[in-house]
Image (cartoon, rainbow, N blue to C red):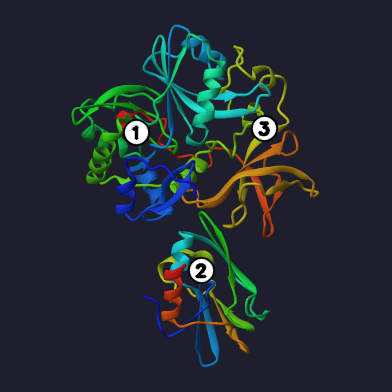
Amino acid sequence: MTDLKRTPLYSAHTELGARMMPFAGFDMPVQYEGIISEHLATRSAVTIFDTCHMGEIRVTGNSALSSLERIVSCNLTDLPAGRCRYGLMCNEQGGVVDDLLVYRMGDAEFLLVVNAGTKDFDLSWIRRHADDTTCVTDETDETAKLDIQGPGSVRVMGRLMENPVADMKYYAWKTNRFNGRDVLVSRTGYTGEMGFEVYCGPDAALDIWNSALEEGVVPAGLGARDTLRLEAGLPLYGHELSADRNAAESGLHRAISKEKNFIGSEAVNSGAPSFELTGLELEGRRTARAKDLVTGPSGEEIGVVTSGSFCPSVKKALALAYVKAGATRRGEVLSIQTARQVLQVSLVDRPFYKDGTVRRPASEFI
Amino acid sequence: MTPDDRKYALTHEWLMIEENVGTVGITDHAQNSLGDITFVELPTVGEAVKKGDECAVIESVKAASDIYSPATGIISEVNSAVEDSPETINKDPYGDGWIFRLENMEEAGELVSADEYEKNLDSE
């Protein structure tokens, strides 16, 4: 095995007895006490995730906006400083090379938060397609990131941070201070719950982590992160999003501008997509897994599963799948061919979990 | 601790024989490796199984695993309670989390003692 990278929180994970697993080149915690308990703690209380592995890329210069408008699928001109937005980077064929959050830092300054496994590619892709006068800097190694998620996150963040967070709107960011150190806080996350992402220097990460645990925040691993995002119907790069699948098929309309030209926009915005990302509910507790085939009423192959798991809050086995557009109707019974047997599934709306607190005002949770 | 009142397969099942009836479950190590168990497919009562046959399936949030019969025999009883509450296997793998029982046992596979099973885990 090649040498795995460690986040600044590695020793905290091993001291807690976390089960570690290689993920995108990092040795990352999958679970501490258990995926289901960490999942449920996020929905009902508050958890903290080590997301230091993710990539941060700063893009600056007078041409930064025009460069990023060409590289990223969502509109950025109308994104004010103090807000962030979810977008995709596409290739010329309309496939997705990564999904990302774009933070508007100022008129001529942006911070991109990208997936760990794609960061190096992203960096070269952005440099290749940005204007020569745009400055693109990899700040991943100097940036630690912690996600504090769940309805209890507002109170905990209020105690940890020097400045208030309860006034922050969904997808807003603010600079803040923790123990005299500068941090950036956004009201974002990947769980479907009220929550915050905290960016800080690597030397502050362990202090924030330990202070959160002292406040009763439950550590949660990548296992719960995956079941939470699946229940919330959120895509995961490498599963729902990939370079060989047209972005339009993802149904991420809010992330894809129809009013501007970006790399791949012609392929993405030309006509109806041939597949649609679809939510499937399995009839029993048995789960489907990525790459299982979806078949129609007469056994014909109509799609493929991209993610599947038993989902602890919905208490059902659920899956996301790309299904041929027009091949199905809501309520129609389809099948999934797993490695072991054929399972009956029906089409259901996303998000699978509908009681998430993510869009409620933070002030309700003080 | 691994109970020493039964035998173990190196595929992480246990077999406890009482009055010619064998009870089968998975070890604490197995349930811990699988993590939170969410689904159990039980064999059918009356089914004849050979040692080493895949005769049950356990799924967890992250993985799926076949359960191999540690002996040849006829399935005489299954633990239906774990179908509705699969987490029982996590909580009590050597007790309430048993999976099935075997009668007319002919041949137990190459089973080992609790001590040997633990030593084998250490060397894995």
Q: From the viewer's perspective, is the residue at label 1 or at label 2 nearer?
A: 1
Nearer to the camera, A106 or A287: A106
x, y percentage for residue A31? 40, 52
Distance between mark 2 and mark 3 Cα atoms: 42 Å
Task: Report the residue marked by disc 3.
Answer: A244
Q: Secondary structure at mark 3?
A: loop
Image mark 3: chain: A
Distance between mark 1 and mark 2 Cα atoms: 42 Å
Under mark 1, the amino acid is: Ala
For mark 1, does the 10 Å Cα neighbourhood hold few (<14), some (14 to 19), or many (20 or more) residues? many
At 47% across and 35% down in the image, what residue appears?
A116
Q: Which mark is residue A106?
A: none
Which of the two labelled residues, at mark 1 and mark 3, occupies the earlier sequence position?
Answer: 1
At 67% across and 34% down in the image, what residue appears?
A276
Label 1 in the same subunit as label 2: no
Q: Is residue A133 visible?
A: yes
Task: Report the residue marked by disc 1.
Answer: A144
Q: Is residue A366 visible?
A: no
Side (left or right) of A88 relative to A274: left
Task: Report the residue marked by disc 2.
Answer: B82
Q: Quadrant of the C terminus of chain A?
A: top left
Under mark 2, the amino acid is: Val
Vertically, is A118 above or below A306?
A: above
Nearer to the camera, A140 or A229: A140
x, y percentage for residue A90? 60, 24
Label 2 in the same subunit as label 3: no
Q: From the viewer's perspective, is the residue at label 2 or at label 3 nearer?
A: 3
Nearer to the camera, A73 or A5: A5
At 35% across and 28% down in the image, what residue appears?
A361
x, y percentage for residue A290? 62, 47
